[in-house]
Amino acid sequence: MQLRKRLPSLTALVALEATIRHRSFTTAAKELGVTQAAVSRQIALLEEDFGKSLFHRGHRSIEPTPACLLLGAALADSFSTIADSVDAMRATATDVVTIGATIAFSSFWLLPKIAELRQLDPKIQIRVISQDSKIDLTNGIVDIAIRYGSPPFNDGTVLASCDDRIFPVCSPQYAASHLARDFPDGDYELIESDVPDKSWYGWDDWFARLGWKPGKLRSMLRFSHYTEAITAARAGQGVALGWDTLIKTFLADGSLVKLGDFRLQAEGRHNILVPLNTKRSRIADFTAGWLMQALQQ
């Protein structure tokens, strides 16, 4: 038997679901933009079809029967599923996905990945918010955030994460002009960056974690952003702390090299988060899924 022949009028079922929620023909009619008489008529047709009453009718109130409540719950779930599917069908390439990350992560990791993503879907529109201060996931500004730290977080759900290693890096020319075995006690210029995140490592933190107390420790250059520190290191201005996840491209193209065999495992992780209890679009889910795979590769 065809499904269409098994089901009552969809209009009547919509009227029934609204009437169950509001416990009122009049309020249901206002929601649906029809008259109270039209809703009453639809309910009457359903009762005739089912061969039973759907409501206990009082003087100024109505109460769904137990069987009616069961049907109403099924209708509510089904309509919700249909609405979600319709939203997904309506989603177009004009939907904008907003991603938040630190300036360094945006510049060094995210932007190259976005280029790869747009090769898969050239019509996708992406907006990137870059800031070193913590991005608030509760204000609805971003769809996806990439945050360094130790989960869980109280404002978002972690979809994927990866750990990182930190080590000294410099340009090949700088490395060639210094003796690696002398680091850090040789004549080295250390490049520092100021980052609001207290979990981010500076040179003092890095040395302390390794249990070192260099005799000639001197920070000759200090920048407000990590991107500037790495740019200075690539330009041969000294030694910076390299976060492996962020500087892989520069190690690969040879503009940066590791100095010595010193490694420090970072305590935190790079995490891809989505806001809690927020309905996401098809494009946002697609983007988040792709970034998850990219981060874990």
Image (cartoon, rainbow, N blue to C red):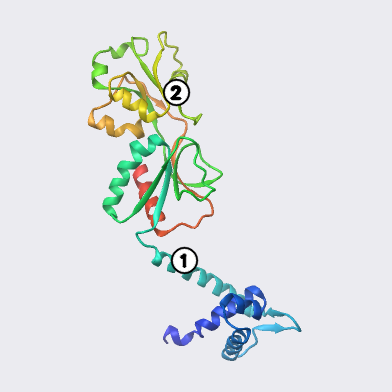
Q: Neighbour class for label 1 at 10 Å: few (<14), some, many (≥20)?
A: some
Up-down: is 219 above or below 14? above
In the rendered structure, the answer to whether residue 232 lies left or right of residue 213 reads left
The image position of residue 153, as x and y in percent, is 53, 42
Q: Which mark is residue 84?
A: 1
Residue under label 2, please give it: 202
Up-down: is 104 above or below 174? below
In the rendered structure, the answer to whether residue 257 lies left or right of residue 21 reads left
The image position of residue 248, as x and y in percent, is 30, 33
Q: CA distance from mark 1 to mark 2?
A: 47 Å
Amino acid identity at mark 1:
Asp
Amino acid identity at mark 2:
Gly
Q: Residue at x 51, y 40 (%)?
A: 151
Say which label, 1 or 2, has the lower sequence index.
1
Up-down: is 235 above or below 147? above
The image position of residue 246, as x and y in percent, is 35, 34
Q: Residue at x 28, y 12 (%)?
A: 179
Front in this rendered view, residue 207 or 29:
29
Total marks placed:
2
Q: Quadrant of residue 218?
A: top left
Q: Is residue 242 visible?
A: no
Q: Residue at x 31, y 23 (%)?
A: 233
Q: Residue furthest top?
A: 215
Disc 1 vs disc 2: Cβ atoms closer than 8 Å? no
Secondary structure of the residue carrying numbered label 2: loop
In the rendered structure, the answer to whether residue 88 lies left or right of residue 180 reads right
The image position of residue 38, as x and y in percent, is 59, 86
User: Is the N terminus in the top left, top right, bottom left or bottom right quadrant?
Assistant: bottom left
